[in-house]
């Protein structure tokens, strides 16, 4: 199964970044029996005309690093097991039809939208006087003058016009040609801005009405496709916009209410099957104020709890059984809505603040990945030439200079540490791990190691090294695998043993 994941606007990119972090930790969608989905490919497509958006650029870079790391570990096998398990690919990577020209990127090409003011895009200057008057009633002057390469500046009425061009793009044609029965589609967008609020219903409309579009294949499969969306409600505030009211925090709720009414009439009504599952997520406790930036300066927001929780929604949707999404004839069922609640309504959150099902899904993988981060940062270099590194395939000192290791440690892990720091410094503060702590026995916030005869059980680099030595000696399975796979698989298995034997169980 392929899960086509359309991340729309700045919120889309930020939620997608959290999904990549969870995937790196080894969090995988589970079926109704609690087993990881097999043969899953995740195909992210970022839709945002604002190419200078720093959140978009950070997410694109992270996706590329993730893909490079995973290829070294598993090749093209969709069924990874452990860190970087989920296969994440571009549309170009899985295309078999060469008649459509497409770049190998996660970014949707919106060239016709990006390179013009809105007035130029709609041909305002070529309209007759009556149509110009009508257009001026519908759009404010600042909207007509909006340079769309910075996005739609909180104006969904602009986005609903501009993004309708998507249906004629090579990316949409490639997506429709690749899509097959059994695949699923998920949208990530905010509802209180411009790009996300408009892009979600426009994309759903074009998919459901694919039979009316020219040059589109697999029309029947698209019209019946299981579709879901994460609709992110207001969760942050802005500061520094006293003299520029194009985007105002005070408008977020009004925009949300208007969009929800529209969504109900077109997407999520009681008898509507345009969207099978809708996930609502927001927080009345707003973030630390983000610097007001309608787009000219890059728009870079700190990571937030909402984005972490939102990243779980596509996993939930991917694991749902077919009979909850389609009737026996394969037609989509009416919309089911989902919400999320914390187990503890705290301003500073750790794993214990999350619900039981969330902890079951992410607790051990995230902790294991954080231990890997600490191990690679503080202990790995000193043990090369000892123990498991001497078993075949040998891990030699030149491995530290390899492209794989540099991408993993100098790029991906650096982004991971920054992501954790940003969430910890936000409101609500997400303190899953103690900032700056390198003592493995103390690093998990709110979780202790088990008691021993004297004191507490030990958890450090030596413990992991010892466990990895045992696992390496007992296994001949690595002889025909890469050193990259051996290192991460050994640590993942050792981490599971350490967590079962040495840490208190919070699940």
Image (tube, grey):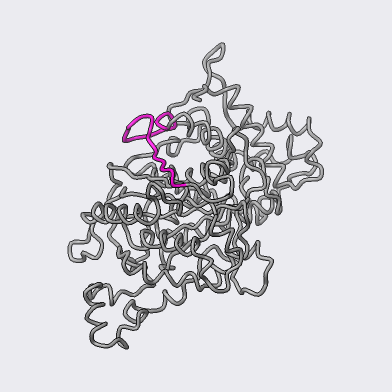
Please provide percent x and percent y for residue 65. 58, 56
From this view, report whether residue 81 is shown above or below residue 496: below
Q: Quadrant of residue 284?
A: top left
Decide whether the magenta segment is chiefly helix, strand or loop.
loop
**The stretch drawn in magenta includes residue 346:** yes
Please provide percent x and percent y for residue 254. 23, 54
From this view, report whether residue 165 is shown above or below residue 362: below
Q: How many marks?
A: 0
From this view, report whether residue 203 is shown above or below residue 349: below
Residue located at (57% from left, 56% from top): 43
Please provide percent x and percent y for residue 424. 38, 41
In the displayed structure image, the side of residue 250 where residue 153 appears, left or right: right
Please provide percent x and percent y for residue 331. 54, 51
In the displayed structure image, the side of residue 387 where residue 253 appears, left or right: left
**The stretch drawn in magenta includes residue 10:** no
Residue located at (65% from left, 57% from top): 403
Q: Quadrant of residue 280?
A: top left
Instruction: Name the residue at the left extreme.
Output: 242
Please give the range of residues in magenta: 334-354
Q: Nearer the viewer, residue 14 or 493?
A: 14
Q: Quadrant of residue 129?
A: bottom left
Residue located at (37% from left, 62% from top): 198
Residue located at (75% from left, 48% from top): 482
In the displayed structure image, the side of residue 187 where residue 300 appears, left or right: left
């Amino acid at each position: 199964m392929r899960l086509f994941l359309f991340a729309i606007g700045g919120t889309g990119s930020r939620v997608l970044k959290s999904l990549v972090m969870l995937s790196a930790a080894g969090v995988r969608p589970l079926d109704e029996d609690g087993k990881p989905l097999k043969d899953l490919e995740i195909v992210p497509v970022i839709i945002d005309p604002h190419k200078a958006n720093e959140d978009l650029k950070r997410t694109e870079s992270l996706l590329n690093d993730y893909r490079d790391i995973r290829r070294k570990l598993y090749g093209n096998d969709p069924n990874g097991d452990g860190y970087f398990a989920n296969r994440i690919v571009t549309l170009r990577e899985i295309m078999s039809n060469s008649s459509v020209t497409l770049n190998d990127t996660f970014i949707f090409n919106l060239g016709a939208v990006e390179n013009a003011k809105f007035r130029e895009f709609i041909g305002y200057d070529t309209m007759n006087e009556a149509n110009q008057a009508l257009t001026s009633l519908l759009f404010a002057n600042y909207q007509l003058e909006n340079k769309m390469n910075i996005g739609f500046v909180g104006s969904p009425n602009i986005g609903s016009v501009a993004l309708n061009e998507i249906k004629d793009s090579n990316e949409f044609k490639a997506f429709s040609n690749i899509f097959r029965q059994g695949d699923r589609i998920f949208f990530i967008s905010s509802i209180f801005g411009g790009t996300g609020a408009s892009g979600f219903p426009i994309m759903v409309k074009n998919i459901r009405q694919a039979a009316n579009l020219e040059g589109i294949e697999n029309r029947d499969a698209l019209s019946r496709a299981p579709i879901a969306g994460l609709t992110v409600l207001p969760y942050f505030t802005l500061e520094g916009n006293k003299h520029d009211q194009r985007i105002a925090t005070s408008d977020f709720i009004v925009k949300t209410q208007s969009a929800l009414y529209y969504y109900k009439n077109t997407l999520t009504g009681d008898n509507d099957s345009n969207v099978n599952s809708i996930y609502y997520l927001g927080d009345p406790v707003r973030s630390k104020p983000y610097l007001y930036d309608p787009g000219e300066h890059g728009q870079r927001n700190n990571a937030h709890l909402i984005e972490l929780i939102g990243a779980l929604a596509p996993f939930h949707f991917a694991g749902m059984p077919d009979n909850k999404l389609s009737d026996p004839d394969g037609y989509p069922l009416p919309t089911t809505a989902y919400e999320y609640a914390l187990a503890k309504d705290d301003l500073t959150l750790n794993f214990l603040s999350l619900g039981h099902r969330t902890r079951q899904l992410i607790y051990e993988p995230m902790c294991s990945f954080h231990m890997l981060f600490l191990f690679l940062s503080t202990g790995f270099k000193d043990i090369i030439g000892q123990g498991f590194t001497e078993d075949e395939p040998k891990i030699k000192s030149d491995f530290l200079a390899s492209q794989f290791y540099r991408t993993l440690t100098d790029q991906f892990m650096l982004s991971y540490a920054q992501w954790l720091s940003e969430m910890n410094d936000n409101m609500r503060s997400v303190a899953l791990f103690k900032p700056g702590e390198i003592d493995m026995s103390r690093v998990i916030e709110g979780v202790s190691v088990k008691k021993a005869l004297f004191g507490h059980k030990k958890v450090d680099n030596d413990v992991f090294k010892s466990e990895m030595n045992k696992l390496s000696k007992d296994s001949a399975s690595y002889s025909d695998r890469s050193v990259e796979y051996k290192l991460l698989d050994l640590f993942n298995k050792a981490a599971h043993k350490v967590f079962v034997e040495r840490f208190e169980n919070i699940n």
